[in-house]
Image (cartoon, rainbow, N blue to C red):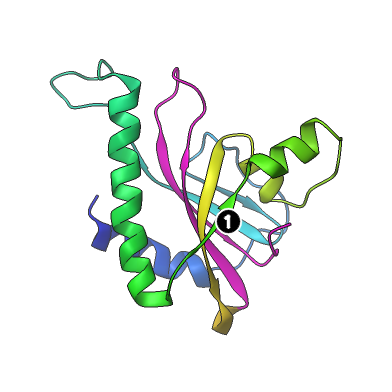
Amino acid sequence: MSSAQHLSVLDPLCSRPFPAQRDGSPTAAQYGGPGYLIRILAEFTGTEEHWDTSPYQDLLDQCEAEREALAQLLGDRHGPAGEFPLQGVLLRTMEYGEEMDEPWASLSGHVEHLYLWRLESLNRWLGLGTSRMGEELPPRLLAVVTETDPP
């Protein structure tokens, strides 16, 4: 999917109503809950000739390159992105047992950092990141839309 096609998915996602209760799981193409939606924009599994045989780092590099290209387009549209590292959220939940709001708690388990834009007109945040659930699952480019401020 091209960056322009990703934008055509993100535009309606940003204004879509949030589910009333948790809907789906992190392995689904789209899932969410009260106050947030997460959409998998792309999954990197290798080329058709070498299906599932590309080294994980190569696939991760492709995913991150696509994230950077899309972040540039989103930056042109919404202004410079902030960067939000999620390792601290993971540490606070795992090490100290601190309760964190969604989507931040679940994202911290498989996304190292997000590019974040505040969509003032919608009173929402838009985030873009790379999901890494270990080498047994392919890296995925994801977007998150939420009304919950980052911790």
Please state, as top left, top right, bottom left or bottom right, where the C terminus lies in the image.
bottom right
Rendered position, 11 above or below 128? below
Q: Amino acid at mark 1?
A: Leu
Rendered position, 147 above or below 127? below
In the image, taking residue 104 as reference, residue 14 lies left or right, namely left
Residues in magenta, as a range: 123-151
In the image, taking residue 11 as reference, residue 15 lies left or right, namely right
Question: In which image quadrant can residue 136 be found?
Answer: top left
Residue 104 at least partly seen: yes
Rendered position, 150 above or below 100? below
CA neighbours of label 1 inside 10 A, class few (<14), some (14 to 19), many (20+): many
In the rendered image, residue 109, in percent from the top left (x then y), is placed at: 63, 34
Secondary element under disc 1, as helix, strand or loop, is: strand
Q: How many marks?
A: 1
**Label 1 belongs to which residue?**
37
- Judge whether residue 146 is colored magenta: yes
In the image, taking residue 66 as reference, residue 137 lies left or right, namely right
Q: Residue furthest bottom?
A: 121
In the rendered image, residue 147, in percent from the top left (x then y), is placed at: 66, 67
In the image, taking residue 134 as reference, residue 104 lies left or right, namely right
Rendered position, 104 above or below 5? above
Which residue appears at 31% of the width and 35% of the height? Answer: 61
Which residue appears at 37% of the width and 60% of the height? Answer: 71
In the rendered image, residue 146, in percent from the top left (x then y), is placed at: 62, 62
Question: In which image quadrant can residue 91 be found?
Answer: top right
In the rendered image, residue 98, in percent from the top left (x then y), is placed at: 86, 42
